[in-house]
Image: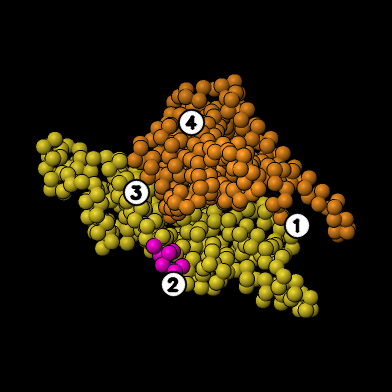
Chain colours: A orange, B yellow
Amino acid sequence: MWLRRHPRLYRNIRQFLRLRFGILGFMIVLIVIFTAIFASQLAPHDPYKQDISKRLLPPAWFEKGKPDHLLGTDMMGRDYLSRIIYGARISLLVALLTVLTASAIGITIGVLGGYFGGVVDMVATTLINVRLAFPFILLALVVIAVLGPSFWNLILCLGITMWIRYAIVGRSLMMSLRERDFILSARCVGCNHLRIILSHLLPNIINSMIVIGTVELANAILLESFMSFLGLGVQPPTPSWGGMLSEGRAYMLSRWWIATFPGLAIFITALGINLMGDGLRDLIDPFKTN
Amino acid sequence: MKGFILKRTLQAVIISLLISFITFSMIFLAHDPAMLLAGPEARRDDIEIVRKAYRLDDPVVIQYGRWLWKAMHGDFGKSFYSKEDTMELVAQRLPYTLLLATTALALCLSFSIPLGILAAIKKNSVVDNLATVIAVLGQAMPLFWLGIMLSIIFGVQLGWLPISGSGTIWHLILPAICLGYYISPVIMRMTRSGMLDVLKMDYIRTARSKGLPRRRVLIKHALRNALIPIITLVAVQFGFLMGGSVITETVFSWPGVGRLAVDSIVNADFPVVQAIVLILSMIFVAANLAADLINALVDPRIRYE
């Protein structure tokens, strides 16, 4: 290929392509956020309004579909498109709060362990190893079963389950950073530990944490949807994609579309976030890409 | 080497003890076990009688010791829900999970390792991009939705494969494909980056400059060295595999421990949940300890870290 003979041009094209997928992901995420914020303006119907006479309508392009119910209705006659639109709200909210909780736990454990070393690090690594040994989905399910399913318990449970990556990466970054000269000089000037961690070390790991946070946002959406699918996550009648999928599963034999759309929503959202995360990593850390 | 083995084993024991304590205390955080045992119609006096009878009024540490002693002998008590012996329930289901997990792992490895290697050898080629697309799509795919979609397409619409239960080899196909695809992005990425790392090594350059044929350099020098860390990394991914198995078993009504765990969690059947969580975690700890020791045996640098 002639491109091979022009390595710089080739690299630029590849970088542009990669970036383009990042931008595509960013746009998907923007659309989902927009949908979530303006759900009440965008949804054609009230997502909670039941109408038994219009149960299980197929999407509008089917023979028996009604044009004002674009994606049909569910088994209680609620407009499916409106429920999917409102579902974006709950999915994003849960995922965002989860990432905040999990990163707070994970960064604290990782930073303290990596910075102080010794006994503190032993505690941190033990915590990490104990958490790694639990199959994470079982851990999440057990925690929610113990706490009881509610919105805040769900966040807490996902937070307890998903802090691990921040801790592992944060710890190893800390261990290499604390040996650097600027930390030594900060210590010589007389900065205390708190000051060194907060104003010299944290700013240096925040980029990596943001990249992890984006990927974990998608994972939080996937885990939340599975828990709602089992009935242990977001509780009905609040529309959640996972819960809708589990309702749709009951009609798998005759009406395939009911289970298809909410899953598609989860898939596209997670894909958008992941693409955005990959693009972000390339931008923040261009040397790490292969 | 002795010191390393001792240190790692001690670490594994401490982690196992912590895990068992967390698993044990779960039940006390959730409910009053005496109330659960006595049943919903029990009066307050009955609950107290049960508490005395099962010695649930002892200090928690003593109860934990007793529970751990029994658990180490395979006695997790009776299921609250079915009143059967917990260990027997789990033992009936474990082979199904192992069958599903190994089939999925075999499928995944036979597909993602060659793809990962090809992607690394021909960096930025069509194969590399294809591998990236497969990995990116796989990471965003909700596993339970993939299961339902495959059921609808191959089970309901085409009628080729059964969509739930077990018994024949046909029942295994859809769940194994789902679970295999679920873990393949991780394995593929690990293979690709591991192979890329090896290809950068000096001994590869040496082998090439000696004039060895390309194929021979790749297979004899690069691949062998790249595969060792991949095999051990598979051990680390055990938790991930089990997590995926929980989802897959639920969707396809596969009678493994994952589905048993989900059912038991929904029914608040804590002895069964405790047994499954503890057994799976112990398998993980043991697999990792073994992987670490084998690594140290093969690569002396690790011992002196």
**Element on which disc 3 rests:** helix
Residue A144 in the image: x percent, y percent?
39, 40
Q: Quadrant of residue B206?
A: bottom right
Query: Circle 1 is placed at which residue position?
Result: B124
Quick check: do tags 1 and 3 share a chain?
Answer: yes
The amino acid on which the numbered mark 1 sits, given as a three-letter code, is Asn
Q: Main secondary structure of the magenta part?
A: helix
**Element on which disc 1 rests:** loop
**Which chain is mark 1 on?**
B
Do callouts 1 and 3 mark residues in contact (Cβ within 8 Å)?
A: no
Query: Circle 2 is placed at which residue position?
Result: B2
Residue A203 in the image: x percent, y percent?
62, 39
- The answer for how far apart the CA atoms under marks 3 and 2 are is 30 Å
- The answer for how far apart the CA atoms under marks 3 and 4 are is 33 Å
Q: Residue at x 60, y 23 (%)?
A: A38
Q: Residues within 10 Å of mark 2 (few under 14, many from 20)?
A: few
The amino acid on which the numbered mark 3 sits, given as a three-letter code, is Ile
Foreground tag (3 vs 2): 2
Q: Residue at x 47, y 72 (%)?
A: B1
